[in-house]
Image (cartoon, grey):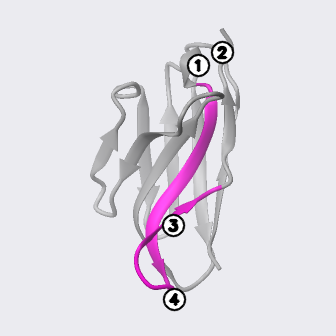
Amino acid sequence: QVQLVESGGGLVQPGGSLRLSCAASGSGFTIYEMGWYRQAPGKQRELVATITRSGSTNYADSVKGRFTISRDNAKNTASLQMNSLKPEDAAVYYCTYHGTEVGVVGVKLHWGQGTQVNVPT
C-alpha cells in the first residue's frame, strides 16, 4: 500500500515563505503527475499546482509568480515553495499524485492527509 505524507505546514506572517514537502512510500507503484490542492474553511478544494514527470508545471492564477512546485522522481517526492504568502493562502494543503499500483486497475488520484498553512490577517 502506498502512503503519501506531507510536511512543512505552519504559521507564517503575510509576506513570508513556507516550503511544503510530500513523500510517497511503499512498493509496487508508479507516479505520473504530482500536484498540490488546498481547501480553506467554507470553500471548495482548489488546484494549486501540478508537475509532470518531465517537469512541466501548471499553476492556479492566484499563485503564479509566488509558488513553485518541484519534484524528485527518483525519491518520489514533491515540494511546494510558497513565497509572498497572503492571508487568502491559508488553507489545508494536500499533496496528490496520479499513478498506478500493482493489483489495481487504471490510473488513480491519490491524496495525502493534508498539512495546515496559516497566514494571519
**Residue 105, above or below 75:** below
Q: Is 101 included in the stretch rendered in magenta?
A: yes
- Assign a secondary structure to mark 3: loop
- Label 1 or label 4, whichever lies nearer to me, is 4
**Residue 63, above or below 86:** below
How much space separates mark 2 and mark 3, taking CA atoms? 30 Å
Mark 4: which amino acid? Answer: Val
- Which disc, if any, is residue 16? 1
- Which disc, if any, is residue 102? 4
Return the residue nearer the eye: 47 or 43. 43
Mark 1: which amino acid? Answer: Gly
- Which disc, if any, is residue 76? 3
Give, as a single range, the part of the protein colored magenta: 90-112
Mark 2: which amino acid? Answer: Gln
Q: Which residue is drawn at 53% across and 39% down?
A: 45
Q: Residue at x 51, y 31 (%)?
A: 82
Find out whether the residues at labels 2 and 3 contact each other: C-beta distance under 8 Å: no
Which residue position is annotated with label 2? 13
Q: Residue at x 27, y 52 (%)?
A: 56
Find out whether the residues at labels 4 and 2 contact each other: C-beta distance under 8 Å: no
How much space separates mark 3 and mark 1, taking CA atoms? 27 Å
Q: Disc 2 or 3, which lies upstream in sequence?
A: 2
Find out whether the residues at labels 2 and 1 contact each other: C-beta distance under 8 Å: yes
Q: Horizontal placement of 59 versus 9: left or right?
A: left
